[in-house]
Amino acid sequence: LTGSVDGINLLVKNETLLNNLLDLTTEDSVAKDAVLCLVNITAEETGAAEVVDKLVERLVPIAYEAVLDENCKLSDAWCMVLCNITRPEHLVERVLQSLLAIEYSLEKLATCFTRVNYNKQKCHLNYLGPLFSNVSQSKAGREVFCNQTTGLLRRLLPFVHHDGSIVRRGGAVGLLKNVCFDSSVHEWLLSEEVDVLPFILLPLAGPEELDDETNEKLPVDLQYLGPDKKREDDPDVRKMMVESLAQLCATRKGRLYLREHGTYEILRELHKFECSPEGDRGVLNAVESVVDILIRTEEEIGEDNLKQLEIPDDVKAKIESMNHHS
């Protein structure tokens, strides 16, 4: 039944049935089918909304415990359920409240995510990546990741370069982009402690040879990359990276830092690539918006924080068009 929208709509109207389905996820013989039903139901936004409405307080702890259990065969399916019910922005807060009611839940999930082969039953937990990204749509979620004491973000950033799984990599990049959305943490993000810029620029860099002067400007990780350097091949991921740079342009300090560290030069080469047959129109537009800001002098921009009002309408429109961070 959960393979069709009609089937899902029929099932989610019945609260007793949904509760019974949740009970069955702990009955060994049918647990797998029961959890996969929940994956299917929550994959539809209407289904996700009903599940959050009727089950969230019960479901979140069960899903969380399953992911934390290194011998659970269904951890990946439970990750997908959590991922599905946090994707719609209007559901995030309620699910997050249930998660945050469990002490250190996001920190512990991050540990499962970052530990190689954490799950002993061949679950890869890649879907925790998009879960972190979804949760960071919320200010309360971003605060957990940007907690300077736990250093949670720093542990997750390396996964923006993760080769093995686009789900894991895309999730880490989505998290990074959402965190950049908050200009109050920009100074910390660009500080030595987090040093976010190389994480963003490296996937955008290709095999192009740059002159010594440019290499000097670049973060050490990006200097003299060599002819076998591969650029991120997923256009959605490249676009999120460029949009992260756009967010970091919101403050004058951010713009100066980006200019001083070779961001323009990396984007110039990326622009050539996006204009080639391999490139992508959407990424190209995003690149042009950021370049447009970086090539202006601060006198031209004339305002410290681009998110404040007195900025040229054309620049403002460009930034506004990127501000949507789903």
Image: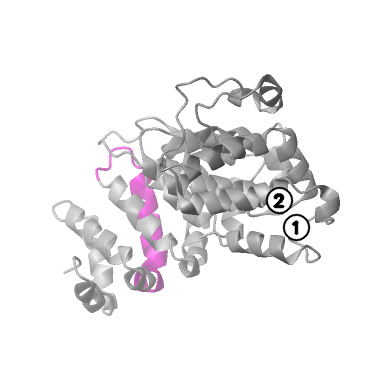
What numbered label is drawn on residue 293?
A: 2
Q: Amino acid at mark 2?
A: Ile
| Disc number placed over residue 162 in the picture, else none | none
| Location of residue 167 by image quarter | top left
On screen, residue 293 above or below 57: above
In whole angstroms, how far apart are the C-alphas of marks 2 and 1?
Answer: 10 Å
The image quadrant that residue 44 belongs to is bottom left
Task: Give the residue at x 76% y 51%.
Answer: 251
Task: Give the residues in magenta.
Answer: 50-73
Tell me the number on the disc at residue 306: 1
Q: Earlier in the sequence, mark 2 or mark 1?
A: 2
Front-lying residue, 211 or 102: 211
Q: Quadrant of residue 191?
A: top right
**Membership of 56 in magenta stretch:** yes
Is residue 167 covered in magenta? no
User: Could you tell me residue 29's position as x and y percent?
Assistant: 13, 52
